[in-house]
Amino acid sequence: MSEEMMEGEVVKKFMYINRRAPYGSIYALESLEVVLIGAAFDQDVSLAFVDDGVFELKKDQETAGIDMKNFSPTYRALEMYDVEKLYVSKESMDARGLTVDDLIVDVEVKTDAELADLFDDQDVIFSF
Amino acid sequence: MKFAVQVNEGPYQHQAADSAYQFTKAVLEKGHEVFRVFFYHDGVNNATKLTTPPQDDRNIVNRWSELSEKYSLDLVVCVAAAQRRGIVDEGEAKRNKKDAENIAPGFRISGLGQLIEAGVQADRLVVFGD
């Protein structure tokens, strides 16, 4: 547990693990809503994208055909909320033929083993 | 220890709704504290008092209400998730011009900040879902 006091407030390491494709279920969208609200709490926030979750960051999402709102531009706004630590799983990217050039935001590519270490280091993990 | 619990799946559809209840009950019976139970995604459906399961089946909604009354357990339903899925208290009904409310006793509707706060305040946040 790494907790530090900052201006009298507890700062914890929050990790949001995004595991699902952006459409097909509501988990990805509602996860992003937690991240945006949570940003106001000044915690030490990271996001990891694994399995089909890497598709959430795919460029050029076209959703008109399924009558859903394309919420992918919101990931670009995370920077303004000081949410800047975004990690993607190398294995998940490779398995889906994706490279960082396919993604709408800057990310750090980590192997699953490195991600496991990162998860180990967190205080709070939200898994969506 | 101080726990927080997050419930991400709906009642009767998914074991997570049962496991969350059983875990919370066990933790309280062991004398631990549960700072809050937060219902998100389809988990908000655990809060509708209109649920009527067969008589020989468990009543998942009433179970939460009873646990809340016994231990003064804070049961919070995410407002954004609730609005999408039609879980409504009196205030929400008025605000959104609905002619009914359906929130079960012991539950309250509030914002996602309550989930983040639970993560900050609790020693462990335990998430039940897929």
Image (cartoon, grey):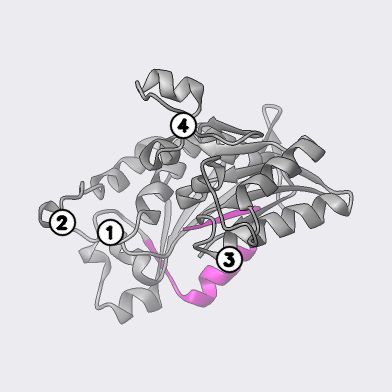
Q: Are marks 3 and 1 on the same chain?
A: no
The residue under label 3 is: B15
Examine the rendering and report whether any part of residue B35 can be seen.
no
Could you tell me how far apart the alpha carbons at marks 2 and 4 are, in whole angstroms?
28 Å
Q: Are marks 3 and 4 on the same chain?
A: yes
Residue at (29, 64) in percent of width and height: A55
Viewer-proximal residue, A20 or B75?
B75
Residue A115 position (above or below residue B104): below
Label drawn at residue B88: 4
Examine the rendering and report whether any part of residue A55 can be seen.
yes
- Is disc 1 placed on a helix, strand or loop? loop
Residue at (36, 53) in percent of width and height: A26
The residue under label 2 is: A66
Query: Which is in the foreground here, disc 4 or disc 1?
Result: 4
Could you tell me how far apart the alpha carbons at marks 3 and 4 are, in whole angstroms?
24 Å
Q: Amino acid at mark 1?
A: Tyr
Label drawn at residue B116: none
